[in-house]
Image (tube, helix red, strand yellow):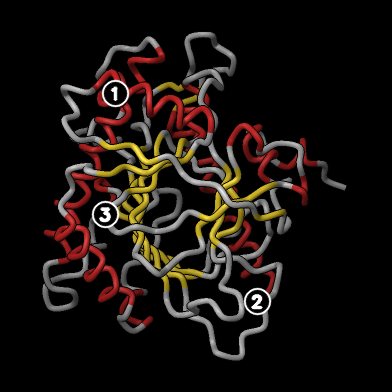
Amino acid sequence: MTTTAEKYTLKELNLETTFGGMGREIDRDVPVIDLTDFDQRREEITDQLWDAATEVGFFQLSNHGLELSLIKQAFGLSETFFALPQSEKQRFPLKKGLNAGWEFKSQVRPSTGTADDKESFQITLPHMDDLWPNQTVVPEFHRVMLDFEHRAWQLGMKVLSCFADRLGFERDFFTRAHDRTREDYQSTLRLLHYLPLPEDYQPDESIWRAGAHTDFDCLTMVFQQEGQGGLQVSPGKDAEGKGDDREWFSVTPKEDRITCNIGDMLMRWSDDRLKSTLHRVRMPRPGDYNGPRYSMAFFCQANKEEMIQGPEKKYPPISARDYLLQRIQANFDAAEKAAEARK
């Protein structure tokens, strides 16, 4: 029998295999951090970010500077893309190991062993040749998503500069590590469509819109639409060793707030001072809104050639290329193997 230790090389993946189960739901608030007058209030904001990242691992940003009109425009184009016939979307297939392109129910989490009930479109700039829908397919998609991706990157680097200050790195350390002009850039804007459910849907505890997981990256920024809930969090410092008794709380979506969480890359770079945070998207329950759910996530993922190792060298060095590739393969190879077995 294959043991957990034998299944994955990375500690984070082995831990993720223990994250299944419904757990217990509790009421808890996510810290909200106001970025108004960022330059003048940098020290205060940095303290608030650090407290939120170490105590909860999730936080929301308000007055963040991204225009609500641009966010709504990006959501509208995302919905238009996902409304295309499947035969049209298949023209933009996910490129293996590169986090670019369209996939449908192909992400299998180590925590569940079942495919997430969703489809997604990944935008990773160096790998988008032949993946942009043209003007006749989704007008303005290319222009708006490029603009949105750039603005999300700028905000992500601003937040990460605060963590760099507290970790003793140079302020622009993470900006250089996520250099958008380099060919090995691998930060990703992900458009997500969680599938609507039929009226007679019967809950199945093995199926999730997104199974419990931690993110691969340094920082994730999630854009949500009001009334389309389901995102749940288990606080980072409480994530290990609780099994089915693990506590979960729901994050209420607000269209003018960006929900953020720490990812595994930053956990490693901080020698575990910052904890990546366990989260999931549950299926609607009877009486809940059961229509389509749309979200957008920007993943600040260090450039491929960057070496990830904290100042205390708690973990051996690993390139961001190898780290991300192992995480992607763990999620998508299982789906490929299942598909091969069905042939």
Eyeballing the image, is 30 above or below 38?
Answer: below
Q: Quadrant of the C terminus?
A: bottom right
| Foreground label between 2 and 1 | 1
The amino acid on which the numbered mark 1 sits, given as a three-letter code, is: Ser
Q: Residue furthest right?
A: 1
Q: Earlier in the sequence, mark 1 or mark 3?
A: 1
Q: Earlier in the sequence, mark 2 or mark 1?
A: 1
**Numbered disc 1: secondary structure:** helix
| Foreground label between 1 and 3 | 3
Looking at the image, which is closer to me, 234 or 312?
234
Check disc 3 and report the residue beneath it. Answer: 256
Eyeballing the image, is 113 above or below 6?
Answer: below
Q: Residue at x 55, y 43 (%)?
A: 214
Check disc 1 and report the residue beneath it. Answer: 161
Check disc 2 and report the residue beneath it. Answer: 343
Sort mark 2 into few (<14), some (14-19) or many (20+) by Cα contacts within 10 Å.
Answer: few
